[in-house]
Amino acid sequence: MIIKVPADQIKDWDSFHTVFQSTLGLAEFYGRNMNAWIDCITYVDDPASGMTGVSVAEGEILTLCIDDAPDFRRRCPEQYETLIECCAFVNYRRMERGAAPVLALMLNGWYERT
């Protein structure tokens, strides 16, 4: 499943959490911090957990699609880098528990080497 994340609406940490809560239907009790984000996304293949409004079947991958990723990276470098790290950590955490990875990140757009 591919979910387009409207990263053009992200300006700071508050808007980051608002966008992801709205886009992925994160739980009402979502703590609006990256530890809570990781907790919710870790269970995206367990709809009974109530952690997300979207879910994938066991063994499937949720792909978060960021269009114009270079613009997001320029505007919000901290949120951009943290998103990459936390996506990787969700999969690492699952694999440490013997579960399959569940998350991919699709960064669309042209990058110039620096």
Image (tube, rainbow, N blue to C red):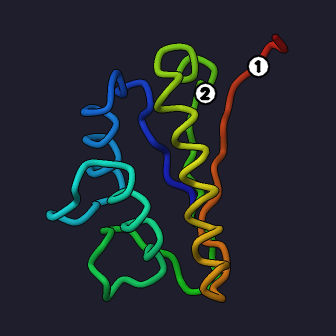
Instruction: Find residue 95 and report its horizontal and vertical position in percent.
Output: 67, 78
Q: Is residue 45 left or right of residue 15?
A: right
Name the quarter where the N terminus is drawn. bottom right
Determine which residue is flagged by label 2.
69
In this picture, is 111 found above or below 10?
Answer: above
The quadrant holding residue 31 is: bottom left
Which of the pair 66/94 is nearer the observer? 94
The kind of residue on which mark 2 rests is Ala
Instruction: Find residue 44 and report its horizontal and vertical position in percent.
Output: 45, 73
In this picture, is 81 found above or below 47?
Answer: above
Q: Residue at x 59, y 77 (%)?
A: 94
Q: Residues within 10 Å of mark 1 (few under 14, many from 20)?
A: few
Give the mark nearest the N terminus, 1 or 2: 2
Q: Residue furthest left?
A: 28
Which of the pair 94/53 is nearer the observer? 94
Q: Residue at x 53, y 83 (%)?
A: 57
The answer to whether the residues at label 1 and label 2 have Cβ atoms under 8 Å apart is yes
The quadrant holding residue 111 is: top right
Q: Is residue 86 left or right of residue 33?
A: right
Determine which residue is flagged by label 1.
111
Q: CA distance from mark 1 to mark 2?
A: 8 Å
Name the quarter where the C terminus is drawn. top right
Instruction: Find residue 59 and report its horizontal and vertical position in percent.
Output: 64, 84
- Local SS, label 2: helix
In this picture, is 22 found above or below 47?
Answer: above
